[in-house]
Image (cartoon, rainbow, N blue to C red):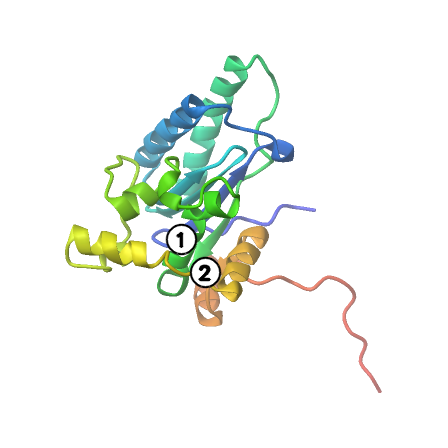
Amino acid sequence: MPRRQRLCAVGIPQHIVQRGVNRQACFADDSDIAAYAHWLCEGASKYGVQVHAWVFMTNHVHLLVTPLQEAASSKMMQYIGRLYVRHFNYRYERTGTLWEGRFHSCIIQQDQYFLACQRYIELNPVRAGIVEDPASYKWSSYQANALGIESKLRSPHPLYLGLGNSKLKRLERYRELFEGEIDGPILFDIRMALNTGLVLGTGKFKKEVEELTGHRTSLVRRGRPAQKKD
């Protein structure tokens, strides 16, 4: 069965997940994560991708990005993959694949889901039980988005900038977003869109993406067509 063509549109945010094969570790220590982050920053600049949020876990990576050129996200991920796998295999004297096939991705409707998706990414270490406060995990964008720690990797999205008319106000308002949990239905929608590789958004937005990309944005039911009744 042919692979579904990846949905990607210039200027529309995209949630990306890259996992280690069989959920195995793809980072053994901080120096591995630093190497990946370096090539991510390099690849984003090279191919025209804005990186808004990230989290680097032991066996997977979450990114929230906006491609500024056609196929920019795929080119960036291919660039990182080649360099990082070479680094990892050489360092640990291994061969073969490191990643679980293609990375997963879905398009995000900005006004409805963008900030929720950004919170979802930065809360990953909390959900995993690694830390109780996202500020305690240094390998995510939370410290940049909520605490104001400078990062060359980060490109603030307009919705983030719209949280306040000063840096201090934006940081304060952003931290307030983390005082409550992400609503269950939104959490379900984020995971479903990522697992299917389709679109996280309203029906109207999905139709707009279909018209823009020429590709369907909803799942097709499998099985035989329903029989007509007499």
Which residue corresponds to the image point at 70% horizontal and 46% vertical from the top-left? 1
The answer to whether any part of residue 51 appears in the image is: no
Q: Amino acid at mark 1?
A: Arg
- Say whether residue 192 is left or right of residue 68: right
Residue 47 visible in this rendered orientation of the protein:
yes
Q: Position of residue 11 (x, y in %)?
A: 34, 53
**Residue 30 place in picture, x, y as percent:** 42, 25
Picture quadrant of residue 137: top left
Query: Disc 1 versus disc 2: distance between alpha carbons?
Result: 8 Å
Residue type marked 2: Ile
Which residue is found at the position 55% from the left and 49% from the top? 5
Q: Which mark is residue 182?
A: 2
> Which mark identifies residue 44?
none
* SS type, badge 1: helix
Q: Residue furthest left?
A: 166
Give the residue at mark 1.
Answer: 119
